[in-house]
Image (cartoon, coloured by chain):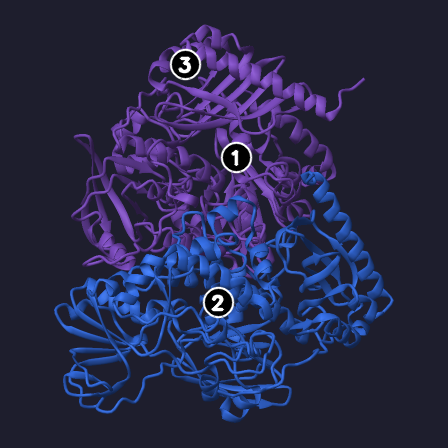
Chain colours: A blue, B purple
Amino acid sequence: MTQSVDQKASAAASATNEWLTAFQQALTAHDADAAAALFTDQSYWRDIVSFTWNITTVEGGAGVADLLRATLDDVDPAGFRVTEEPAEEDGVITAWIAFETKAGRGSGLLRLVGGKAFTLLTTLDELKGHEEPVNDRRPNGVRHGAFRDRVTWAESRAREATELGYTVQPEVLIIGGGQGGIALGARLRQLGVPVIIVERNERPGDSWRKRYKSLALHDPVWYDHLPYLPFPANWPVFSPKDKIGDWLEMYTKVMELNYWGSTTCKSAVREGDGWAVVVDRAGEEITLRPGQLVLALGASGLPDVPEFPGREKFRGDQHHSSAHPGPDKYKGKKAVVIGSNNSAHDICAALWEAGADVTMVQRSSTHVVRSDSLMELGLSDLYSERAVAAGMTTFKADTIFASLPFRILHTLQIPVYNAIRERDAEFYHRLEQAGFVLDFGEDDSGLFLKYLRRGSGYYIDVGASELVANGDIKLAKGQVAELTEDEVVLSDGTHLPADLVVYATGYGSMNQLASGIIGQDVADKAGKVWGLGSGTTKDPGPWEGELRNMWKPTAQEGLWFHGGNLALSRYYSHYLALQLKARMEGIPTPVYKRAEVHHTE
Amino acid sequence: MTQSVDQKASAAASATNEWLTAFQQALTAHDADAAAALFTDQSYWRDIVSFTWNITTVEGGAGVADLLRATLDDVDPAGFRVTEEPAEEDGVITAWIAFETKAGRGSGLLRLVGGKAFTLLTTLDELKGHEEPVNDRRPNGVRHGAFRDRVTWAESRAREATELGYTVQPEVLIIGGGQGGIALGARLRQLGVPVIIVERNERPGDSWRKRYKSLALHDPVWYDHLPYLPFPANWPVFSPKDKIGDWLEMYTKVMELNYWGSTTCKSAVREGDGWAVVVDRAGEEITLRPGQLVLALGASGLPDVPEFPGREKFRGDQHHSSAHPGPDKYKGKKAVVIGSNNSAHDICAALWEAGADVTMVQRSSTHVVRSDSLMELGLSDLYSERAVAAGMTTFKADTIFASLPFRILHTLQIPVYNAIRERDAEFYHRLEQAGFVLDFGEDDSGLFLKYLRRGSGYYIDVGASELVANGDIKLAKGQVAELTEDEVVLSDGTHLPADLVVYATGYGSMNQLASGIIGQDVADKAGKVWGLGSGTTKDPGPWEGELRNMWKPTAQEGLWFHGGNLALSRYYSHYLALQLKARMEGIPTPVYKRAEVHHTE
């Protein structure tokens, strides 16, 4: 006999309540061991700021006990409870929970197996006394009544723009005004944290607008919402670059961000409890003195152009993919694109569409996944029209994603990519027949883990692969030996005639990029950014358990890193903003297990 | 014994289903009399475009039978059904319904009393084969695959901007780019109707920005959402004018509207099946040839400045309220504001706040209602944070509002204003003690009906009334006899010394405004705009049953009027857009009971 749906739900509810009661009792009693005993042997507690003022994952009973012993006195957790009916599937009970700490209110997701916690995610959602002014707390807009010398909204905004950075110092300075800086700026403004965003481009959105003209988001709209202001129902699935640029510009304006375009950061030096940051704002040199410095520089900040011999001899056009203007002037020309990841594919396809003769140079194996398959098998349970129709909210989807422990994420992803390989077997076969060298990540865990581990090595196919498979985009393989006046020469002696060479060769590391601002010493003190310590290519161990240095305290007090795609920028900006706000308000923020630095580059 | 909640719900459901089944049977049998017999003696069927290609209300069985005899053959209505559980309260069953017609899909709201229809609202929501590209129909954004000579989104937008109005003619021309024109433009774009919006101001939002600096919306945020893109959760309750201006500008951009700023319309002449419209676009004269012409000119298009004797003698500043810059330069000066409605109060208060000596001249009685009371008693069941939390959507709130027959709307409003009078008795007493002459509309039905009938005669108090009551704003009463070099002189001989005179004297009629574009003949053919024919001041009879000429076919083929506050612009733009789209697609649109013209001015 199988249980009825009602019986299952009721059993899930009592098991969850039993666990939460026991957990709360252990916490109240400050009995770390009793709490630890409520977790399975192989278990993961990921905490985002609520217990640890860090983003950290502990494993097993020992990890749980260690975390609690270090934090209980300060955190004073209370009120663990479910916020909706728990669900059970395949023996795993999933429960949405809420709780309080001394400093704030939190929520999370709990998975129980056999009555014990297999995974627990806890997040700090708001600081007590510093709740966001949204919904029933939204501002009135005008102050009703009569007041001498009233200052209007426009006057107040104008005064702020005049004063902030000049006579009034920002609490937080964000360097980099792409989606990451903008999302964080919006969160901080809601929290009443004075913040300036500096951006070398003129307008918000320019970091998208200035890229090659065929660029569009490879992530779908449901995955891309910014905080507070979701895209409307008529927004395209895959935003063209100029359209997302316009959205970011609009967003920056209506969220009332203090956004300094045409501003470059020349240096940032630690000074007292804060920073002295010299910026050039459209020709004017200004020294800013923020308490907290956030680098939201983007993964595409520092073009990496290999120093191939003979580059200076080449007579045609040559540029990095980030400077590629688009295909219009290359009709009938011979183009050689060095690289085989996203930009390389997009640029090759656009050149072919415009009538160029295109050769792609593949230097190492590449993970390719068809956009349709990625959407349907990889994302659509959480981020799709179907998910929305089934009641999935962006916050819930983000939370579910965040609740999957990095340690076992690959085991959850491998089956997805196995299914994709099966579904698209004929597609992959044809690509390989054409000579393209494929991979699915070193452990076959696919795209998202490649992104987290190294941020490169893949192409989400939106059409170029068909051109590679059928030979419309010619394929060359191997390393580049040199350039001549009119050719790219490969190590195996292949000569590729070229009027245009595009270096789709990726970007320098965040450490390199940061060192240009904070200096090599401070950059190295903070260490390598991004990657999990998985021991795979470009992501050396030891295992870190979390993304290095992202959205959490670094080894350099007052220095923070922020970024990621639109989804990660949206989700983690929430928790980074709360950490910054807490520091501004002088709320104690003892950091549990600040990550050690094992690598710089 | 009272019924249990479940019993009540079940009884409501069966009564509704019984009614809908009988109604559908009568419609299918084309038996207008049988359908009419399903309505109570005093009953109202309001149809918005779905049966009538008009916005019209018929009354009682005879009205229903007449409507159906005229429309059934064309409309072929089918599938009447409930879309959620009907509810019963005080003997009235309320049911959300849906149905189909030959041309489209519709929905509505039905109220049953004693098993018969007391009110029925039917609306056309979409045209079959022309559904909006939203949610699961949203565009892909980029076309995946490889296509020679691909045109990017930015190129396509740029081409459209270059061609539309020059080598390609718009189907619809909207004159007036305030919230009305913008909302309609957004709807039409979703429906694939080529449209240009022309606006005399430079940028979208300028019609707000250019008004007096203390202006803020008097309607709350929940009532003000534009189509597709609701305000975010942090948006203020009452938008300051510059902030709503920014929102409109950004909305216009992200909704990809073809918005011609700095463009004035010089003339519009009927030509064949369409119009020849001469516009001046930033100095360039262009003749546009749209099929349909929409006047969305706004109620504040034509300042009405009375020709008081002696105006030319006055040495101080004098201007209409629409040209009032704000109070900053009038500190310590004597200001006389003529008028006692919204603008007069706002301007008086701002002048007082800035330290001017202010006198308001009340020429006739004024309806005053405190903002708090209006929100809580007048709006909050439909438009408030509380309503949203209880599951009220904007569409539902709008539909409920639209379902209340204009014929009996005053009977529903009178109790609300009686409650407000009671609640604020002391406030009203103090205003009267100060000499202010109050009214609540001729039948005590309050603000919204004054708005619908005449669009003037009221103040939503956000603080100025206190200044009137306590004498900080001085009050003078009566008509203006003349101006001297430095005074305003009233008919009773009162002399009011003045450095500044503000004419808060309202605006000319829509007919006057329209005649400047389409000529007096065509303006008079279309007749008076706005008002219900209630037989009250400025709204002469006969009873019209609907707002004159708004959002529906006029007596002049191809000429349409659009506008109203943000809420009306949002709701009715939907149905106006469908009427325009149907005409563009050649879908038959036989208009039932096109309104006769009884008045011009």
Horizontal and vertical percent position of residue B287: 18, 44
Horizontal and vertical percent position of residue B334: 55, 55
Judging depth in this view, the residue of A138 and B310 nearest the camera is A138
Asked if badges 1 and 2 are on one and the same chain, I answer no
SS at badge 3:
helix
Residue at the disc numbered 3: B67
Residues at marks 3 and 2, CA–CA distance in whole angstroms: 65 Å
Residue at image coords 71%, 25%: B6
Q: Give me the disc on residue A445.
A: 2
Which circle, 1 or 2, is nearer the viewer? 2
- Residue A46 in view in this figure: yes
Disc 3 marks a residue whose amino acid type is Leu
Quarter of the image for residue B376 reads top right
Asked if badges 3 and 2 are on one and the same chain, I answer no
Q: In the figure, is residue B251 to the left or right of B12?
A: left
Judging depth in this view, the residue of B546 and A118 nearest the camera is A118
Look at the image and tell me in which quarter the N terminus of chain B lies: top right
- Of callouts 3 and 1, which one flags the residue occurring earlier in the amino acid sequence? 3
Chain at tag 2: A
Q: Are marks 3 and 1 in contact (CB under 8 Å)?
A: no
Horizontal and vertical percent position of residue B160: 24, 52
Residue extending farthest to the right is A29
Disc 2 marks a residue whose amino acid type is Ser
Residues at marks 1 and 2, CA–CA distance in whole angstroms: 50 Å
Residue B459 lies, with reference to residue A505, above or below; the image says above
Residue at the disc numbered 1: B398
- Mark 3 Cα within 10 Å, few/some/many (few <14, many 20+)? many
Look at the image and tell me in which quarter the C terminus of chain B lies: top left
Chain at tag 3: B
